[in-house]
Image (cartoon, rainbow, N blue to C red):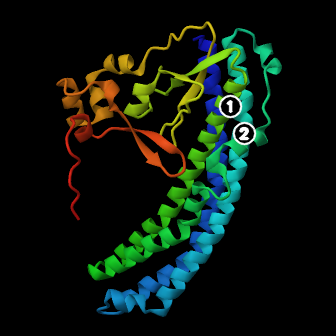
Amino acid sequence: MPDTVIELAEQFKRALIAKDLQAERRLITAYQGLFARVRDLADALVLEIAASEEMTPAQVQRMRRYGELMKRIDGELSDYSAYSKVEMSTAAREAIRMGEANARALVAIALGDSQLAARFNVLNTGAIEQLLGFLSPDGELYKRLGGLPGYTADQVAQAIIEGVGLGKNPKVIGRALTDAFGMGLTDSLRMMRTVQIYAYREANRASYIANDDVVESWIWYADLRQACPACVAMHGTVHPLSEKLNDHHCGHCAMLPLVIGAKNDIESGVLWFEKQPEAYQQQALGKTKFEAWKGGEFQFGEIVTEHNDAVYGNMKATAPLWQLLGAEPPVRTK
């Protein structure tokens, strides 16, 4: 694999991340605005709770200010969800445009002639969008986004009720309320990042398929120093064009084209990891998993597992130790 292909892929990734950051800043600004509008009601509720010597959770739920706060949160977050849907749709369309064009450029560089990109089959980006099930207006992505107001309101309510029930200081309750409200922003940012990168990569793959007279497969390429263990293990593996790159939420692994007749000379992530200092290996795996790996209880390549996501289907993940050792999952206790 020529260094120029990797360098170009890295350049394209930086451009996509820059677009992602722009979209994220807009979401953050919108969320800060709605939180400022909610904050006064939340502060007034906490002050009223503080003024009462003893108050039960049931009494809090009957308070006028509590009801007003929950209603305001639901309304503000419903508006934010609608705004986020527009932002995500716009970001996905831009990612598709970039992904299709960048894929042709990568193939051209892999063939040794950057001028070839203009002569490859060009796909209609609208057609690619139609192929991506997770961008369907009635799909699970937007259902998940639509559930944001109710979920976040429940987290805020739980923070308040639990705080009162446990007799916590009103300042502590206020901080817990703020943290719970912030989960809505965290969720929306994760959705934005993931929809952009998945749309981009699927546009890459669609372009590779459209030009399968010169592209025979793709190579999984990870940023080894920043990737999770599962993505490190996948690095350098070759995949058919029929297979998508299904890393985890917010993942930024890339699909490098392997043109017909070319050799994959990228060192596998497994071999790369085995050469790293033990301090790094332990930091990446965690002490217990590192010791099990060093003890030969599992091979590093076995660390990749999958889970099913309602929006994206099967997604890669790092297997927990119990799974690697063939044991039963631990019993969860409340």
Residue drawn at the location 34% of the way across and 25% of the way down = 301
Q: Position of residue 254 (x, y in %)?
A: 56, 29
Residue drawn at the location 58% of the way across and 61% of the way down = 143
Q: Which residue is mark 1?
A: 206
Query: Outermost residue toward the right?
Result: 119
- Identify residue type, mark 1: Ala
* Real-space CA distance between mark 1 and mark 2, rounded to the nearest whole angstrom: 7 Å
Nearest the eye: 164 or 81 = 81
Residue 333 is drawn in which quadrant? bottom left
Query: Outermost residue toward the left?
Result: 295
Q: Is disc 1 in contact with disc 2, using a CB cutoff of under 8 Å? A: yes
Residue drawn at the location 59% of the way across and 20% of the way down = 217
Q: Secondary structure at mark 1?
A: helix
Quadrant in which the C terminus is drawn: bottom left
Q: Position of residue 184 (x, y in %)?
A: 52, 63
Q: Which residue is mark 2?
A: 128
